[in-house]
Amino acid sequence: MGPEEETEDEQLVKEIEAIMAYKFKDSKLVVEALIHPSYYYPCKPEITYERLEFVGDAVLNCLVAREVFTSYPELPPGPLTRLRAANVDTEKLARVAVSHGLHRFIRHKAPQLEKQIQEFMESLLEYPIHSNGLLDPPKILADIVESLLGAIFFDSNSSLEIVWEVYRRLAEPLINPETLGKHPVSELHELCQKNRMELRFLKETWTEDTSIEVLVDGNSVGSATYGNKKEIAQNRAAKAALDWLKNALADHDPPSDSQSDP
């Protein structure tokens, strides 16, 4: 490694330490935590962030589970699980990455990544807290948050408290029971069950035009498409159906054909 690369690495470590508010003893962990497998293309990947991400993911899940368990003693396991998931899922971690500019330091050769990150950042304006399954954040953003937390875990002699202190500051505001939104598919199921309506997701259309259609009592009340992302298309179709159905129930009108993207 030549002087120029060393200088680049030193600058990288300095900026990451400022963002994380943590001083690394082993600066090589910082560099490792930010190397995507594509960085070595077309050669075989050497050191990448994947091992540190594996550790960071496990540590973070444990810490957030502890936090929600101790903070909300009245919550049963179901809501606790949803609350934990909302604070560690791909979207939440991707939001942490872009809000602190961590994406600027990823070392990669993935040609579409910059565009995907920019599109994700622009979409956050519509969903300031969490989209509950309506967005498709680049997974690499969540990966580097986990890998950096994994790096801190090892660098701090496996200190859970130090890792939690770093993550809590970066992730504020954490999602709480008041800001935890319902997943559109779950909410739609609940609404239809409550009103004794038959709900069906028409997935046959996915193979035809990559869209998902929602039928309630045999009537189309929502549809959506989202590139080749079937799960997100289904979530968006559920959201469209949910919005339409709530309005129809408020007006005491029976469902009739109406389709819209959220």
Image: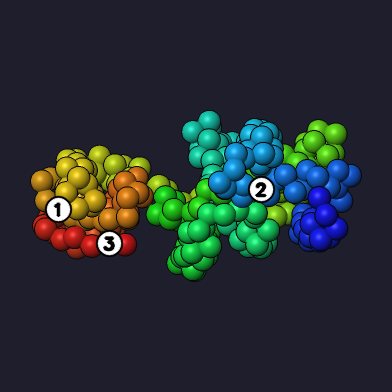
Residue type pointed to by label 1: Ser
Question: In x, y percent, where is residue 37?
Answer: 59, 44
Q: CA distance from mark 3 to mark 1?
A: 13 Å
Question: In x, y percent, where is residue 220?
Answer: 14, 53
Q: Mark 2 or 1 closer to N-term?
A: 2
SS state under label 3: loop
From the viewer's perspective, is residue 104 above or below residue 89? below
Q: CA distance from mark 2 to mark 1?
A: 46 Å
Discs 2/1, front: 2
Residue type pointed to by label 2: Ile
55 on left or right of 16: left
- Checking the image for residue 261, the label placed there is 3
Q: Mark 3 or 1 closer to N-term?
A: 1
71 on left or right of 13: left
Question: In x, y percent, where is residue 204?
Answer: 17, 42
From the viewer's perspective, is residue 127 above or below residue 132? below
User: In this view of the protein, can residue 175 be seen by the observer?
Assistant: no
Crowd tier of the residue under label 2, counting other residues whose Cα lies within 10 Å: few below 14, some 14–19, many 20 or above: many
Crowd tier of the residue under label 1, counting other residues whose Cα lies within 10 Å: few below 14, some 14–19, many 20 or above: some
Q: Mark 2 or 3 closer to N-term?
A: 2
Q: CA distance from mark 2 to mark 3?
A: 37 Å
- Checking the image for residue 35, the label placed there is 2
Would you name the residue on which mark 1 appears? 220
Question: In x, y percent, where is residue 212?
Answer: 23, 49
